[in-house]
Amino acid sequence: MPVLSRRTFLARATVRTALACGALLLGAQMTVASVAIAQSDAGPRIEIELPTATSPMSVRLRNAIDGGRFEELLRNGFDVRVHMRAELWKTGRFLNDVVARQEWDVIVHYDQFDQTFEVARINGDTEVAPLGTYRRLADAKAALALAYSPPISRPRPGQSHYYSVQADIETLDLKDLDEVTRWLRGELAPAVQGRRNPGTALGRGLRTLVSRVMGGEVRRLEARSPLFRVTAAP
Amino acid sequence: MTTDNGVVSLQTASRRRLLTRTVCAALATCLATSALAAQERGAPRVGPLSSQVTIAVVEAWNAETTQRQRGRFTVAAGDTVRRTLGVVDGPVIVTGTVLGDIVVINGDLRLDSTAVVQGSVVVVGGSVVGRTRGRVDGEIQVWRSELAYREVDGRMVADDNETFFSRYAEWRKGRTDAFRDVLVSSAHTYNRVEGLSILAGPRLRLSRGASRATFEALGIFRTGDRVAWERRNLGHRLLAEFREGTDARHIAFGARHVDEVSAVESWALRDAETGLTSLLFARDYRDYYNRFGGSAFVRAAGANGSQLHVSLGREEWASREARNPFALFRGGRDWRVNPGALEGTATLFGVKGVVDTRNDPVQPRDGWLLSAEYERGHVDISRAADTTLFALSVPEITYGRVFVDARRYNRVSPHSSVNLRVVAGGLLHGDALPAQRKLSVSGVDALPGYGFRSLEGNVDVGMCNVRPETEFAAAGRPAGCDAMLLLQAEWKGDFRVALFGADARTDARRWYADGLRADGTWIIFANSGRGWLVGEREGELTYPRGSAPLFDGFRSDVGVGLDFGILGVYVAQPLQGDSNTPRVFVRLGARF
């Protein structure tokens, strides 16, 4: 067996150690990468379906309230609101322009009395499209992920276009809560008639403050479609 | 897989293994297909109940031949239900036989292996367990959404209007904005003059149709450097407003009376940024003065987010001293002196207009944000604590001041934008500007490559200071310019870090969780600006009224940064001045 000099032995050991470390690191990174990709697949995301000859474009928001504290806040009476905005952009020579835009909300409300989740899509101020009432949160999430085709006019043939969709997901903030409580007050006991204890307003304000300080949830998602060009019908 | 890899030379054993695997794969495929078919038969559907389903379920329940049950119900092995079985709020467990249909409303159904249903199964507001275990001769329909109903004279009636959101919609249609409550809120951001300023008091809003009246009587309590009920810790904000129209389009008029602390140059930095640096590091990047007085106003709001606000008022102005409020990581640092203000009685006429056509107020990609204001003031001076440039020895001054902040957002490709901003303002006419209306071009928002209110070179074009450094610092480094011009440009583009190759499915997606985006935008920016004094031309700091030192003596910097949504990290390199060291800074949100 050949006898290695101390220097050669150390050099080979160093190379082996480096290779081992490199392999380990590579393996670890690959593991991390695969986990990351798996998470990105399972994580919150927007999917945009381009329009076809027979169907309009559609938007689907998947896993919107997964992770974070949305679920906990929802069960504690803080509704989740998803504000969606879809824009059709046209590429120009120098600048891109917004051709059309639509905004809508999807709200998940937890009824603590019935222990059900109600989901609805609200266009504008008053147009409400119920998406169902569910006992299981998983079903409410599935309703939240239903595809929707916003009334965006089809792009004109010839030019390059793309869709940009943003989703702002949040537990109702102070202003919204204020509005909802005003609504509840209007239905249950009109405050202008002085039948409500102002102290409860203070209590609600403090509850809201605590909720925001302790981590009210806000999440923004954004997605763009690939560039596409509508060809004129033959 | 082996066959996919194109291996053609196989030994016998390998062939046998391959054959076995192929047969197994074919069997598995058959099973999977049949399982899939079974799953599709009765697969749960998410979404609102269609009217047909609702009608069918309600009719089935109300039919005289239906055997109606409430709550948990079991068809035991050996038992036979000879009619249609309707169950509300189940669950239903079927081990025996049902000769008719099964209708389950807002409950689950479990079919055991011995279960036989000769009719169909419809479940609304629940699920079916054992769809493939038991025998169901008819169809299986499962709807996850619950049925809203009420009972009238023993009969079920679908109640589509009883959901939270339908009630919400009804309310929105016929709502009034009327309310009365007690507001508790922070009045300002945390600062060295007030500490935490708390606003509390009653609010009343009356509404009829498109008309609205709002009244507020809010008290202000400041924590300062000690929580005590003393005059300097107290203030108020009173408001009476009458409005005709909607939030988006309206005309309003009203009056307000305030005793509050206002910021000088609030255009630079956001409230959250100044509050956070004050609370964390005892670094307050704004100056303040006290206003006591009232004003009347008219406001009109119209298309494209445009708004016009005209006001006329009379106020007592006073200086405010910096106090010693709490800061988390102070490190022995003293608060900066709050510069003195011009004290006296001011009569003010103001016009402010805003046009906002941005596509997104948070991360705009397209559109304009134009803000312009003009103020004409007459001040009867009681005490000139104005230490900015010259001691005012006159009993009164009159001034006209204009201020414009114009921003344009341009998307140049799906992935990038070029944004421009011009900020300009100054003395338009009159004698001189009061200290609280002076301007500066300094700080992280304007020229981040230079230190906040730091003197650079022989001529100070940032704050227009002409005094020695020690005197300037002792006065609190006040803004002292009569006019200023700032130009900002930035090129932004999206980035995603994908060390191991892009995932095609997420390539065009950007998202941030819990406020922090996993990917964001890179930014290359440049800023250039200066301030100057108005008067007879003297040196490189004073220019005659109506003229501007265009690109003469401007301070400029360039830089790069990464914006992660709520947080951006940047580095800026000054192009002039004594210091050549790049500066790293953090912004909450986009730069502009």
Image (cartoon, helix red, strand yellow):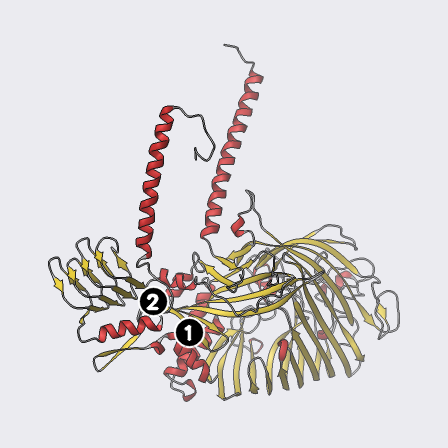
Residue type at mark 1 is Arg
Q: Position of residue B87 (x, y in %)?
A: 21, 68
Q: Position of residue A212 (x, y in %)?
A: 47, 66
Q: Which residue is outermost to the front?
A: A234
Q: Residue at (85%, 72%) from the top-left corner? A: B547
Q: Are dots 1 and 2 on a single chain?
A: no
Q: Position of residue B167 (x, y in %)?
A: 39, 78
In the rendered view, does A5 fall on the left or right side of B32?
right
Query: In the rendered structure, the residue with mark 1 lies on which chain?
Result: A
Residue B61's image quarter? bottom left
Q: Position of residue A120 (x, y in %)?
A: 42, 70
Considering the numbered disc 1 on the image, is that residue within a helix, a strand or a loop?
helix
Is the N terminus of chain B in the top left, top right, bottom left or bottom right quadrant?
top left
Is the C terminus of chain B in the top left, top right, bottom left or bottom right quadrant?
bottom right
Pointer 2 local density, CA inside 10 Å: few below 14, some 14–19, many at least 20: many
Residue A16: mark: none
Nearer the observer, B247 or B151: B151
Considering the numbered disc 2 on the image, is that residue within a helix, a strand or a loop?
loop
How far apart are labels 1 and 2 at the CA level?
31 Å
Examine the rendering and report whether any part of residue A172 can be seen.
no
Residue A223's image quarter? bottom right
Query: In the rendered structure, the residue with mark 2 lies on which chain?
Result: B
In the rendered view, does B242 fall on the left or right side of B100?
right
In the rendered view, does B90 fall on the left or right side of B498?
left
Q: Which residue is outermost to the left?
A: B78
Residue type at mark 2 is Ser
Residue B145: mark: 2
Residue A204: mark: 1
Q: Is residue A36 above or below residue B196?
A: above
Nearer the observer, B104 or B360: B104
